[in-house]
Structure formats: structure tokens, C-alpha cells
Image: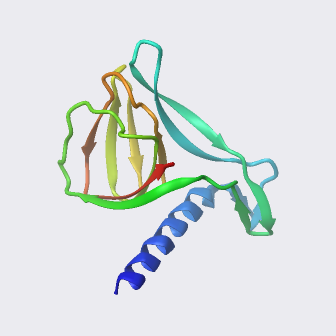
Amino acid sequence: MLLITRSLAIFTILLTLSNCAANNYQNNKIVKNEKMQMIGLYNDNNNQSYFKDIDINVTPIGIKAMTSGNYPINHLNLMEFDAGFETSYHNSINQQYIMVLEGVAEITASNGEKRIIKAGDILFAADNAGKGHRTKTLTRVRIAVANVK
């Protein structure tokens, strides 16, 4: 049962990543020099969290496929939150890739900027110091959290 659950989790993550890339196709062909994107969450010199869009370089591996480079991770957690779940300001324990598998959430950086993340989005949380960020789920949310080594 554990093997099936792990296989399903890995398949779900791969499917989510492929959905992130779905907009990079035109007429069933990869658009040249197209990039995937993720949202970065960092802290500045004043320990205020802020967002920055990150381009992910990709390499075509076929007519209808592309891949990024490898991202080293230590472990993977799968999490689920009911609608209306809210946190106070907090920091990421370590750098994390957060892949939204289902649902919609609002993230507020300590500088006041808000971003909506939804199924198919990837958030790279690296605000490990300062005030941090807040999270509020607008719907039920399922995420995969890949913790960086």
C-alpha cells in the first residue's frame, strides 16, 4: 500500500509539473526559448519577505516535451489544509519547493505584497529569516513540499 501511495504521489507531482508547462505549447510544438516559471519568496537585507518571479530554463526533449535541470532535495512531504486555514507570520524552516496540487491559497509577504497560488503553481520559499510570510487557504489545498538539501 505504501508503494502505491508513493507512486501515486510521484505521479501527481509529475502531472502537476507538466500542467505548469502546458501553456508553453502552441500547435503541439514547444515554443522556442520558452521557460517555465515559479514564484520565489525571499527576505531582503532588512529581513522583509518579498516575491520574485523565477524563470526555469528548460530543454526540449521531444516535440511535446521539455525538462528542467535537476533540483536536489532532501525529503518530500504531502500536506492538505481545509478552506479557511490561516497561519501567523512564520519563516520557512529551510528552502522549500511547494507544488500546489489542488486548491487556491493566498500568501502575504511581510512587505505587504500578496500573491494567489493555485493548482499547478510552484512556490520556492526561501525566506528563512525575519518576519516571514502568512498563508491563508481560500479553498481546500493539497501541496507537495520538497525540502532542499
Q: Is residue 95 left or right of residue 131?
A: right
Q: Quadrant of residue 19?
A: bottom right
Residue 107 vs 149, above or below: the answer is: above
Asked whether 24 or 145 is in front, the reply is 145
Residue 109 image point, x, y percent: 36, 28
Q: Which residue is situated farthest in the top direction here?
A: 46
Residue 93 image point, x, y percent: 35, 40
Residue 68 vs 135, above or below: the answer is: below
- Taking the spot 19% from the left edge, 57% from the top edge, the residue there is 82
Residue 13 image point, x, y percent: 49, 66
- Taking the spot 70% from the left edge, 47% from the top edge, the residue there is 35
Q: Is residue 120 left or right of residue 93?
A: right
Q: Is residue 77 left or right of residue 16?
A: left
- Taking the spot 44% from the left edge, 58% from the top edge, the residue there is 75
Residue 94 vs 128, above or below: the answer is: below
Q: Is residue 33 left or right of residue 91?
A: right
Residue 57 vs 17, above or below: the answer is: above
- Taking the spot 80% from the left edge, 69% from the top edge, the residue there is 63
Residue 32 image point, x, y percent: 82, 52
